[in-house]
Image (cartoon, grey):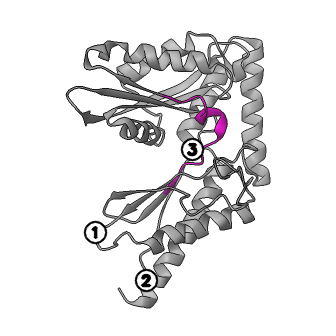
């Protein structure tokens, strides 16, 4: 690949990142929309049904006005799929950063990214270490964005179980939803990571939020129903719709450990994927 082609590639990555963020911030994925619509049709509590209708109206207005679905536009979590011929370099990270800055200015997004101690706001949703870019191999160059708000992120949890406690995992997931209550703006989606390492389980849980809700395993369905049985309801105001879906990802772990993470997501489960042209 020539130097000019390489430069063009970085520009394409920046443009695709900004465009994917715009799509994610303004339009919910069809599988999430379908779950919200179904919940509004099946909900029996008048208060809960009204809250779900407010959510649907909010989604409609966001698309009509091309404005972010939620005022908390989150911080960007970025996943890149790289084909073998594209090496991961610092220039790619910088291209992603440019895309985030462009999206922040043009959509616009609320500048949420701050220094953890001084709380200094960069104003661009980027810093030297952010956005974090997660790399996976593939046959096409794709950028996936997962804007993550604080309300749901703050009530996420991780626990290092012992191997003999595996039967307690569903209880831990349901307990996480119970402790969160209305703070993550339910109805929620739960990403669960089981296995790996301390940090690996958290990554698995976040990656699980990228999985479509069209199909859930019997285990995922059971946990989802148990969370709905809590009666927390939309926005924590009661009702039978607390959880829209549960997705679980697994990884091998040490024989002496069993890490489990739950990454909470609000009803505004924003995500989008775009393919980046290679020429």
- Compared across the picture, whether 168 is left or right of 40 comes to left
Question: What is the spatial separation of the Cα atoms under label 1 and label 2, in whole angstroms?
Answer: 15 Å
- Numbered badge on residue 19: none
Residue 99: x and y in percent read: 60, 67
Q: Which residue is mark 3?
A: 29
Q: Which residue is mark 2?
A: 6
Is 122 drawn above or below residue 148 in the view shown? below
Residue 140 in sight here:
yes
Residue 6: x and y in percent read: 43, 83
Question: What is the spatial separation of the Cα atoms under label 1 and label 3, in whole angstroms?
Answer: 29 Å
Is 138 drawn above or below residue 52 in the view shown? below
Residue 95: x and y in percent read: 53, 71
Dot 1 and dot 3 residues touching (CB under 8 Å): no
Dot 1 and dot 2 residues touching (CB under 8 Å): no
Q: Secondary structure at mark 3?
A: loop
Q: Residue 104 magenta-drawn?
A: no
**Residue at (57, 66) in percent of width and height:** 97
- Numbered badge on residue 84: 1
Q: Residue 150 magenta-drawn?
A: yes
Q: Secondary structure at mark 1?
A: loop
Q: Residues within 10 Å of mark 3 (few under 14, many from 20)?
A: some
Quadrant in the picture for residue 33: top right
**Residue at (41, 16) in percent of width and height:** 170
- Of marks 1 and 2, which one's residue comes earlier in the chain? 2
Comparing 64 with 145, the one in front is 145
């Amino acid at each position: 690949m020539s130097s000019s082609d390489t430069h063009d590639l970085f520009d394409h990555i920046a443009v695709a990142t900004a465009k994917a963020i715009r799509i994610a911030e303004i339009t919910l994925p069809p599988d999430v929309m379908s779950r919200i619509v179904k919940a509004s049709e099946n909900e029996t509590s008048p208060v809960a049904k009204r809250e779900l209708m407010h959510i649907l109206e909010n989604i409609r207005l966001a698309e009509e006005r091309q404005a972010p679905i939620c005022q908390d536009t989150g911080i960007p979590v970025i996943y890149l799929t790289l084909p073998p011929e594209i090496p991961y370099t610092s220039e790619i990270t910088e291209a992603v950063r440019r895309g985030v800055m462009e999206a922040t200015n043009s959509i616009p997004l609320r500048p949420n990214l701050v220094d953890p101690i001084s709380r200094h706001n960069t104003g661009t949703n980027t810093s030297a270490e952010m956005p974090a870019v997660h790399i996976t191999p593939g046959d096409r160059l794709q950028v996936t964005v997962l804007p993550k708000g604080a309300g749901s992120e703050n009530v996420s949890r991780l626990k290092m179980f012992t191997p003999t406690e595996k039967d307690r995992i569903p209880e831990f997931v349901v307990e996480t939803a119970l402790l969160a209550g209305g703070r993550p703006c339910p109805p929620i989606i739960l990403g669960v990571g089981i296995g790996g390492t301390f940090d690996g389980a958290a990554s698995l849980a976040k990656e699980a939020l990228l999985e479509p809700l069209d199909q859930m395993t019997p285990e995922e369905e059971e946990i989802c129903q148990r969370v709905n049985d809590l009666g927390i309801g939309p926005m924590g105001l009661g009702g039978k719709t607390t959880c829209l879906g549960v997705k679980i990802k697994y990884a091998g772990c040490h024989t002496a450990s069993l890490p489990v993470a739950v990454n909470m997501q609000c009803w505004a489960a924003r995500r989008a994927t775009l393919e980046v042209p290679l020429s």
